[in-house]
Image (cartoon, rainbow, N blue to C red):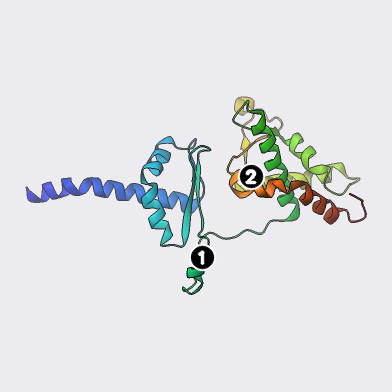
């Protein structure tokens, strides 16, 4: 009888522990979106303080945006006190980005800011052709149009892999039509307002990198 009562008392703690483990494992794998799993998102909101304490031991911090509906882990910002402490290996790797991918991310972030200023819809969806047109004006001119588009598609695929674009299914789900992509709002967490404020100056640098002989 006592064993049964003890198990009954322990059951809520075990359930909470399992939920916490599921949350941390999910965050270590990647971004958690509210739209992807409403139940998991609700659990994350309830247990976020425990998640923060848990991942802090691993040298990580939780970034959670309730308004935009996403959460992810990043390496904790080092303070003066951390400099004297033993260095922990990085669990969240830094990914060096090529110039064209960085350019595409910047252009998508600017497009998202313009879209938000309109205040109409909540999801920014762009066709492949629209993304190609965003980028091509900043890349060196090419006599081989097909090759240029293939190169831009490679950069688009990289941004999809990074999680900043989501490829949408074609209408009907069978016949293949032009690709379209949703710009994920988590992009705002990586390209912040200050970065965006310097966007015009950065584009001038981009132009100089891709075409040094071209003025302005």
Q: Residues within 10 Å of mark 2 (few under 14, many from 20)?
A: some
Q: Position of residue 15 (x, y in %)?
A: 28, 46
- Kindly identify the residue that appears in the image at 76 percent across and 35 percent down: 129
- Kindly identify the residue that appears in the image at 75 percent across and 54 percent down: 99
The correct choice, above or below, for 97 with respect to 86 in the image is: above
The residue lying toward the viewer, choosing from 197 and 94, is 197
Along the horizontal axis of the image, is 111 left or right of 22? right
Which residue bears the numbered disc 1? 79
Q: Position of residue 171 (x, y in %)?
A: 63, 26
Q: Secondary structure at mark 2?
A: helix
Determine the CA span between mark 2 and mark 1.
Answer: 33 Å
Mark 2 or 1: in front is 1
- Residue 75 visible in the shown view: yes
- Kindly identify the residue that appears in the image at 8 percent across and 50 percent down: 2
Along the horizontal axis of the image, is 49 left or right of 203? left
- Residue 158 visible in the shown view: no
- Kindly identify the residue that appears in the image at 68 percent across and 46 percent down: 157
Q: Position of residue 137 (x, y in %)?
A: 84, 42
Q: Residue furthest left?
A: 1
Q: Residues within 10 Å of mark 1 (few under 14, many from 20)?
A: few
The correct choice, above or below, for 204 with respect to 69 in the image is: below
Along the horizontal axis of the image, is 24 left or right of 114? left
Mark nearer the N terminus (2 vs 1): 1
The residue lying toward the viewer, choosing from 83 and 173, is 83
The answer to whether marks 2 and 1 mark residues whose Cβ atoms lie closer than 8 Å is: no
Which of the 4 image quadrants contains residue 12? top left
Q: Secondary structure at mark 1?
A: loop
The residue lying toward the viewer, choosing from 197 and 168, is 197
Which residue bears the numbered disc 2? 160
């Amino acid at each position: 009888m006592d064993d049964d009562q003890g198990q009954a008392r322990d059951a809520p703690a075990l359930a909470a522990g399992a939920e916490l483990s599921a949350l941390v494992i999910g965050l270590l794998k990647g971004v958690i979106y509210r739209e992807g799993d409403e139940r998991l998102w609700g659990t994350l909101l309830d247990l976020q303080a425990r998640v923060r304490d848990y991942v802090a031991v691993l040298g990580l911090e939780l970034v959670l945006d309730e308004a935009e509906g996403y959460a992810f882990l990043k390496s904790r910002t080092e303070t003066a006190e951390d400099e004297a402490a033993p260095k922990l290996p990085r669990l969240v790797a830094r990914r060096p980005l090529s110039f064209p991918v960085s350019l595409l991310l910047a252009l998508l972030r600017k497009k998202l800011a313009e879209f938000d200023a309109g205040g109409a819809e909540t999801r920014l969806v762009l066709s492949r052709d629209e993304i190609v047109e965003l980028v091509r004006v900043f890349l060196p001119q090419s006599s081989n149009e097909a090759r240029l588009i293939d190169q831009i598609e490679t950069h688009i695929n990289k941004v999809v892999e990074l999680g900043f674009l989501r490829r949408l299914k074609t209408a009907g789900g069978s016949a293949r039509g032009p690709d379209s992509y949703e710009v994920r709002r988590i992009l705002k967490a990586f390209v912040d307002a200050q970065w965006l404020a310097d966007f015009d100056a950065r584009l001038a640098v981009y132009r100089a990198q891709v075409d040094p002989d071209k003025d302005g």
